[in-house]
Image (cartoon, rainbow, N blue to C red):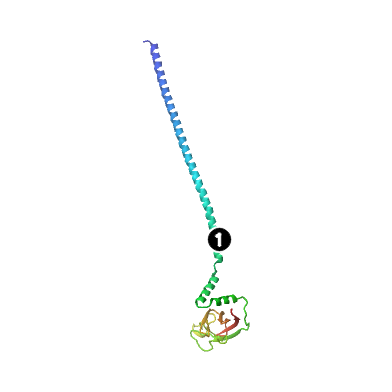
Amino acid sequence: MTLGSWEDRGRTKRRRRVFGRLFVLALLVGAIAIAGTWSYDIGTTLARQDVTLLERQVAELSEQNDALRNERVGLDVEINAIRERERRLLAAAPNEQERAMLALIRAREEAGVDPERIKFVIEAVSNVRECDLEPVTRRFIANTEVRTGSNDTVSFASNTVAVTAIGTAAKDAEGKPLGWFDPALPIKAAFTNIDGSSTVAEGVLPLQHSVVVRDQEYRFNLVAGERSFIAVTADRCQYP
């Protein structure tokens, strides 16, 4: 065999190897391209499905949001209506003084007072008071825990109301009680009606107190007088 024939055969083998490699490479490139296209198509399909799902969820959330917004509007209307009812109820409800008055009326009714009499008295009440404007002043000695005796009572309203008082004995420098009350300390003054009923006023002088006798109201003002004494001034007014 000649040298030229060997060279031709060698070139032919090399060409076949090159073509084989190129063919394999072409197959790989084609496979990669096909795989990429398939992956792209699958990814696009999945992405569209996700978008569709998200759009559906967004639509559902929007509907829920609209429903909640409408529900809130309705609740706001109900809350405003409740607040308005509460305001009206509070405006119509009796205050502390009115509740005390109602309790007093009920107590008088339970005590047997004719409701018509209560109504008459309430209707007769006014800010204009008819008083004698001729006050009477008397004085008496206040008793203490260590002193009781005479001149410890004064009477008013034709001797139908008696006034007495008990105080705390004044003390000397050594702390020993003296024979008169200390006007700087609280006293307890009793106003006793001729029928035996009694009311009490307590506190530091001066003290004010009122007593009703039938259709008359006696207003008392108690102040400290000379040592041991309390001065009582009484004024009479029509009641009610």
* Drawn side of residue 189 relative to residue 36, left or right: right
Q: Is residue 187 visible?
A: no
Sort mark 1 into few (<14), some (14-19) or many (20+) by Cα contacts within 10 Å: few
- Work out whether residue 171 or residue 46 is closer to the camera in this orientation and state it: 46
Query: What residue appears at the point 44 percent right and 26 percent down from the top-left corner?
Result: 30
From the top left corner, tell me how far across and down residue 5 is, in percent: 39, 12
Residue at mark 1:
84
* Drawn side of residue 16 relative to residue 236, left or right: left
| Quarter of the image where one finds residue 9 | top left
Quadrant position of the C terminus in the picture: bottom right
Which residue occupies the extreme left position in the image?
A: 1
Q: Secondary structure at mark 1?
A: helix
Q: Is residue 90 visible?
A: yes
- Work out whether residue 38 or residue 36 is closer to the camera in this orientation and state it: 38
Q: Amino acid at mark 1?
A: Glu
From the top left corner, tell me how far across and down residue 132 is, in percent: 62, 82
- Work out whether residue 69 or residue 138 is closer to the camera in this orientation and state it: 69
